[in-house]
Amino acid sequence: MTNEEYLKKYLPKEKLKIGLKKLKEGKPVQYIVGNVDFYDINLLVNENVLIPRFETETLVEKTINYSKMLSNPLDILDIGTGSGAIAITLAKHLNGQITATDISEKALELAKKNAQKNNVQITFKKSDVLNNVQGQFDIVISNPPYIAKNEQIETLVKNNEPHIALYAEDNGLYFYKEILKNIKPHLKEKNLIAFEIGMTQSKPITNIAKTYFPNAQVITEKDLTGKDRYIFIFNNLKKI
């Protein structure tokens, strides 16, 4: 489906002319329409959150599959929730309690609306990585900002999506380091850490993971285009 077809399908007829104008001016079609399909849910989106992408759908799907290695009910932490896409989808498919954090109040406002829209209960907290997180979790999942400050990205993304959710210091590794350095007190004995990563970041993130979790099984998995896109860290679990 082209962007124009997408607009014609989802925008009311009286808004179509303005919508097509915004499209030509370089505004993402999802922001114009105001919502996007993700996995098997529909989410409100605006300029305060990243547009959820198909790569993250695969992260969610793999995490749901790996969750079968853990005992129910599950305690799950989603760090940097944005629109709430990951947390809400997991709440739909898994049995347990989900906490979702973000540093952006505007993102959290939208995520709360999306949770209501999709009829799920999630505890939302404003937190800079882990500074306002309490409790212990079976699963920690995150699609953090991972683009290096000097990295070239698509103009449409750079000009429209929130830079706070795109870019990270330390060649894009800052948030992985912060999470892995500080997460141990928040983990149950058997746990899974699931990350979406940049396609060139597998080796450095694996090294960081092994620094803090030397006995863990750390695996990299590819997205649907064959690029390295996910890291899963199994603590006191063994991937079959």
Image (cartoon, rainbow, N blue to C red):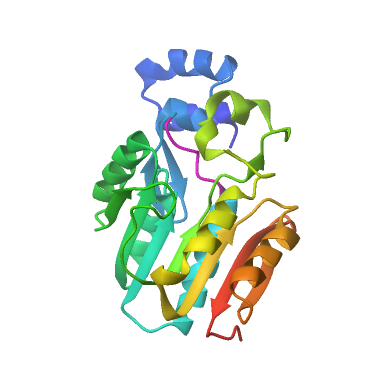
| Residue 49 located within the stretch drawn in magenta | yes
Residue at the image position 44 percent from the left and 36 percent from the top: 49
- The residue located at (26%, 46%) in the rendering is 117
**SS assignment for the magenta stretch, majority:** loop
Quarter occupied by residue 219: bottom right
> Whole-percent x and y of residue 4?
55, 26
Residue range of the region highlighted in magenta in the rendering? 48-53
Relative height, residue 21 to residue 176 (above, below):
above
At 27% from the left and 57% from the top, the residue drawn is: 122
Quarter of the image for residue 107 reads top left
Is residue 226 visible to the viewer in this orientation of the structure? yes
Q: Is residue 164 magenta?
A: no
Residue 6 seen in the current view: no
Asked if residue 41 is positioned above or below residue 24 in the image, the reply reads below
User: Hey, which quadrant is residue 205 in on the image?
Assistant: bottom right
Quadrant (top left, top right, bottom left, bottom right) of the N terminus: top right
Q: Is residue 170 left or right of residue 6?
A: right
Q: In the shown orientation, is residue 1 left or right of residue 80?
A: right
Query: Is 30 in front, or is 8?
Result: 30
Q: Quadrant of the C terminus?
A: bottom right
Left or right? Give the position of 3 relative to 99. Answer: right
Judge by depth and name the residue closer to the eye, 90 or 214. Answer: 214
Q: Position of residue 238 (x, y in %)?
A: 58, 86
Along the horizontal axis of the image, is 61 left or right of 209? Answer: left
Residue at 68%, 50% in the rendered image = 198
Task: Provide residue 25's location: percent of width, then percent of height.
Answer: 57, 14
Q: Position of residue 155 (x, y in %)?
A: 66, 26
